[in-house]
């Protein structure tokens, strides 16, 4: 009946559909994440070349690290969770103007971190820190309303990500001196934990549905063991990152992450780019975690190699792959990667190979390989923008809301 007020607990029907860009969480946040990824690395290359200066809040090294973790990666996580939680609970998280306001809050954090420091440092910190608590509230409401206890763990993970960002800012503000590096590394740890949670729930299902191979499955016990082990690693890295046992535990988590994926059917995905990019991207997780142990335990490789295996390798390729698949599925389109997107997948993976291998080639070739890896990364996300901007800003092709 027109004009009827919704009863308590009833989901109110929107009076009008929002603009397509504000119809679902993945739309603005995947667009912003891809745009930021395309701009961030070239800016970073100009900074290290001395041709550009970014905001004075961070030094250039930690500006790059912070924005890759708490800027780019957090935007992708936000877009995914805002969309997925709506599906899990059958209740919207944020759409329309509230969604655009949430995206604007994320943008405000990036401006505060990158632009000239025109406000006191504490206000810069608060601007950046505000996004994750608001995201938690938006995600928590439908989960709690529908008693979706299984996914409440994601709120704890978002809280851990906020705390990692908080200690970075507390270092800059002089409250916790020496913690900014640890905070950035903890942020990477927590994002790896997010990937381990989401991949176990989705990759076997995606692969089974996409290939028709019914034997593809996950092992709930191995999934739980791997996730719990990664949670322990987060705690160890926060409390005793310098101990040998912490490095050894990273290797344990890496092996568990590899073993749990054994039955996910990677070998059946060669003809499906939307699938193989996820499996190859996931492989960078055990590689990065084992390299961490090797770097800390033997010194045979640089810790940077392990860090970039996890960031450029796993986070970079998996975010690109998930943004490609989710945007197609939730816009009512066929789950098939276009040729430019297949090229983008290849470029992102090649960027990881170059960035991880760069320190092994010696200092005389290091600079050019960093530039090459940056160019490959930028090209990959630029291709995503070219292909997906028309998808993200247009209504669903099947006429459904979202």
Image (spheres, helix red, strand yellow):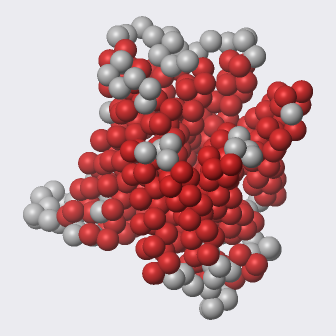
Q: Which residue is located at x 62 percent, y 53 percent?
A: 293
As drawn, which residue projects farthest toward the top? 118
Q: Please provide percent x and percent y for residue 83.
A: 43, 58
* Rendered position, 98 above or below 260: above
* Rendered position, 326 above or below 22: below
Q: Which residue is located at x 67 percent, y 35 percent?
A: 38
Q: In the rendered image, which quarter contains the N terminus?
A: bottom left
Q: Can residue 127 be seen in the rendering of this structure? A: no
Q: In the rendered image, which quarter contains the C terminus?
A: bottom left
Left or right of residue 22, residue 260 in this image: right
Rendered image quadrant of residue 358: top right
Q: Which residue is located at x 89 percent, y 27 percent?
A: 364
Q: Which residue is located at x 59 percent, y 61 percent?
A: 251
Q: Please provide percent x and percent y for residue 237.
A: 45, 47
Left or right of residue 382, residue 183 in this image: left
Rendered image quadrant of residue 262: bottom right
Q: Total number of numbered labels?
A: 0
Q: Please provide percent x and percent y for residue 29.
A: 50, 44
Of the pair 108 and 330, the residue shown nearer to us: 108
Left or right of residue 259, residue 181 in this image: left
Q: Can residue 211 be seen in the rendering of this structure? A: yes
Q: Please provide percent x and percent y for residue 228.
A: 42, 66
Of the pair 192 and 19, the residue shown nearer to us: 192
């Amino acid at each position: 009946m027109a004009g009827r007020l919704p009863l308590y607990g009833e989901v109110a029907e929107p009076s009008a559909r929002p603009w397509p860009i504000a119809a679902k969480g993945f739309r603005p946040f995947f667009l912003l994440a891809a745009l930021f990824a395309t701009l961030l690395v070239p800016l970073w290359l100009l900074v290290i070349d001395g041709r550009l200066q970014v905001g004075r809040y961070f030094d250039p090294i930690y500006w790059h690290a912070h924005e890759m973790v708490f800027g780019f990666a957090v935007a992708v996580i936000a877009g995914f969770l805002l969309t997925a939680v709506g599906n899990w609970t059958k209740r919207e998280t944020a759409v329309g103007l509230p969604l655009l306001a949430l995206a604007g809050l994320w943008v405000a954090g990036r401006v505060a971190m990158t632009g000239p420091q025109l406000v006191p440092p504490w206000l810069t910190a608060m601007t950046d820190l505000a996004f994750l608590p608001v995201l938690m509230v938006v995600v928590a409401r439908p989960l709690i309303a529908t008693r979706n206890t299984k996914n409440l763990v994601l709120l704890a993970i978002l809280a851990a990500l906020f705390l990692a960002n908080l200690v970075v800012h507390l270092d800059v503000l002089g409250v916790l001196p020496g913690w900014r590096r640890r905070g950035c590394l903890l942020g990477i740890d927590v994002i790896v934990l997010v990937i381990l949670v989401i991949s176990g729930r989705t990759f076997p299902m995606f692969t089974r549905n996409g290939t028709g191979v019914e034997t593809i499955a996950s092992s709930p016990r191995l999934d739980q063991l791997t996730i719990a082990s990664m949670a322990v690693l987060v705690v160890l890295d926060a409390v005793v990152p310098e101990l040998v046992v912490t490095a050894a535990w990273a290797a344990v988590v890496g092996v568990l992450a590899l073993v749990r994926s054994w039955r996910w059917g990677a070998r059946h995905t060669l003809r499906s780019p939307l699938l193989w990019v996820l499996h190859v991207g996931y492989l960078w997780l055990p590689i990065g975690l084992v390299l961490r142990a090797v770097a800390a335990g033997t010194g045979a490789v640089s810790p940077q190699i392990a860090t970039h295996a996890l960031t450029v390798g796993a986070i970079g390729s998996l975010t690109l792959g998930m943004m490609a698949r989710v945007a197609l599925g939730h816009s009512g389109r066929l789950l098939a990667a276009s040729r430019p997107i297949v090229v983008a997948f290849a470029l992102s993976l090649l960027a990881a190979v170059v960035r991880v291998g760069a320190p092994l080639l010696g200092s005389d070739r290091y600079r050019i390989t960093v530039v090459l890896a940056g160019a490959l990364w930028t090209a990959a996300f630029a291709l995503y923008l070219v292909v997906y901007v028309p998808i993200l800003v247009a209504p669903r092709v099947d006429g459904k809301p979202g």
